[in-house]
Amino acid sequence: MADVTDISIYKEALSQFATGVTIVTCGSEQGPVGITVNSFTSVSLNPPLVLWSAAKDSKRHDYFANSNHFVIHVLKKQQIDLCSAFVKPTQGFEEIDWQYNSHGVPIINDCLALFECSFYSKHEGGDHTIFLGRVDSFNIDKGEPLIFLQGKYT
Ligand SMILES: Cc1cc2nc3c(=O)[nH]c(=O)nc-3n(C[C@H](O)[C@H](O)[C@H](O)COP(=O)(O)O)c2cc1C
């Protein structure tokens, strides 16, 4: 068995699990905030709860920690550029189509699915904070999902 303290092999083992790719957004006094995230998952159907986790050392972490609403956008396979825009330290919203919802949270147009959430709870998760949201409304479009597997988009 491999040793879990060998971080690079541990990360390689984790990367064998295929995920979709999402962008999570919230509003802030400094403007719209977004982050590329693959830790998204559904938790409960009744009530409808979803979760994602944010690295505590991310510059974006505190915006989400202080926000009452966030929106999760599931990306289509042709949206790698959108995904890359929200990995960088820049804002990410400069060259995309988006508008605010009634809670002041950015909605990015043309994603495969989106979930508008109210903050439900947050939990300690080591070097990450786990955010649970209650889904208030959602939308689905047609298309294929962007998949992240073994450190690559497929
Ligand atoms: C496919 C993919 C998935 C990611 N998932 C997460 C995630 O679930 N949580 C997280 O905090 N950061 C995640 N990141 C990293 C952030 O998108 C971003 O790179 C990081 O927040 C940059 O640091 P900064 O916020 O300090 O600028 C992911 C990056 C990629 C490319």
Image: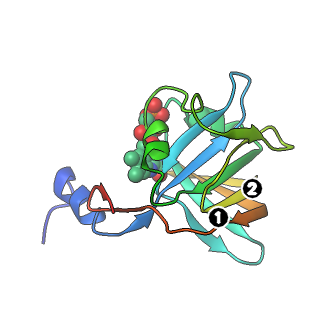
In the rendered image, the residue lying farthest to the right is 102
Report the residue marked by disc 1. Answer: 50
- Where residue 41 appears, as percent x and y from the top left, is 55, 66
Tell me the CA gap for discs 1 and 2. 10 Å
Amino acid carrying label 1: it is Val
Relative to 133, residue 46 above or below:
below
| Residue at left offset 69%, top offset 50% | 71
Q: In front here: 5 or 73?
A: 73
Q: Is residue 120 left or right of residue 96?
A: right
How many C-alpha atoms fall within 10 Å of the one at disc 2: few (<14), some, or many (≥20)?
many
| Residue at left offset 67%, top offset 31% | 32
Query: Mark 1 or mark 2: which is in front?
Result: 2
Query: Is disc 1's CB within 8 Å of ligand 1?
Result: no
Residue 126 shows in the view: no
Q: Residue 77 sits in which quadrant?
A: bottom left
- Residue 116 marker: 2
| Residue at left offset 25%, top offset 56% | 11
- Where residue 153 appears, as percent x and y from the top left, is 34, 57
In the rendered image, the residue lying farthest to the top is 30
How many C-alpha atoms fall within 10 Å of the one at disc 1: few (<14), some, or many (≥20)?
many
